[in-house]
Image (cartoon, helix red, strand yellow):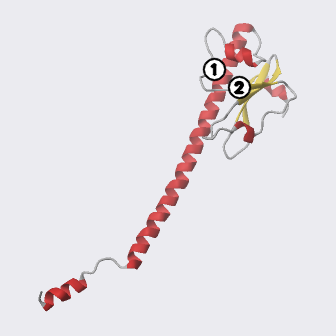
Amino acid sequence: MTLNNIRKMKDERGFTIVELLIVIVVIAILAAIVIVAYTGVTNNARNSKYKQDAASIQKVAETIQADTGSYPTTLSAFQTGSSTTKLPSGVSLTVVAVGVAPASNDNLITAADGTPATYTVRTCTSNGLRVYYPVRGGSTQFIVVGDGTTCGS
């Protein structure tokens, strides 16, 4: 090796530790942003699924009302469904009478993967009911079916 080759190798050392640390910090910041965004997207998707399931329960109740003349007031009435519609698979219900408080949001979301264990249907009268569903990061919400406005709060 000549002296010029040794000097040339000395000038071409590679990256310094500071440069490597800066790259690692930038990658960590980008990863944190992606994780936060992903969590928000999955929560929104779950909320949409919960609302869609509650709307399916509403449609079943309205179909049963159209077939029989009154809304279902028992779990077996929902499980039987009607001649044209049934509950979607994987949807569990708890039916409570008027005056009984619905399950809290914590009780609705109990499965390990964050899916609701049950949806609560609160019968108001033979003319209506409410379908409660969870909202991740918020309170329990409900869909009014028929004259479900008379259920109270």
In this rendering, the answer to whether 14 lies above or below 90 is below
In this rendering, the answer to whether 90 lies above or below 46 is above
Q: Residues within 10 Å of mark 2 (few under 14, many from 20)?
A: some
Q: In the figure, residue 48 lies in which quadrant?
A: top right
Residue at image x 59%, y 34%?
49
Q: Residues within 10 Å of mark 1 (few under 14, many from 20)?
A: many
Q: How many marks?
A: 2
**Residue found at the far front of this picture:** 1
- x and y, in percent, of residue 3 in the image: 14, 91
Q: Which residue type carries mark 1? A: Leu
Of the pair 151 and 26, the residue shown nearer to us: 26
Q: Which residue is mark 1?
A: 87
- x and y, in percent, of residue 144 in the image: 74, 27
Q: Quadrant of the C terminus?
A: top right
Of the pair 30 and 16, the residue shown nearer to us: 16
Question: In the rendered structure, which disc, 1 or 2, sits on the residue that comes first in sequence?
Answer: 1
Of the pair 16 and 126, the residue shown nearer to us: 16
> How far apart, in angstroms, are the residues tagged by discs 1 and 2?
9 Å
- x and y, in percent, of residue 89 in the image: 59, 23
Residue at image x 52%, y 49%?
38
| Element marked by disc 2 | strand
Q: Which residue is mark 2?
A: 93
Residue at image x 63%, y 8%?
83
Q: In the figure, residue 97 lies in which quadrant?
A: top right
| Element marked by disc 1 | loop
Q: Which residue type carries mark 2? A: Leu
Query: Pointers 1 and 2 in contact (CB under 8 A)?
Result: yes
Residue at image x 53%, y 52%?
37
In this rendering, the answer to whether 65 lies above or below 12 is above
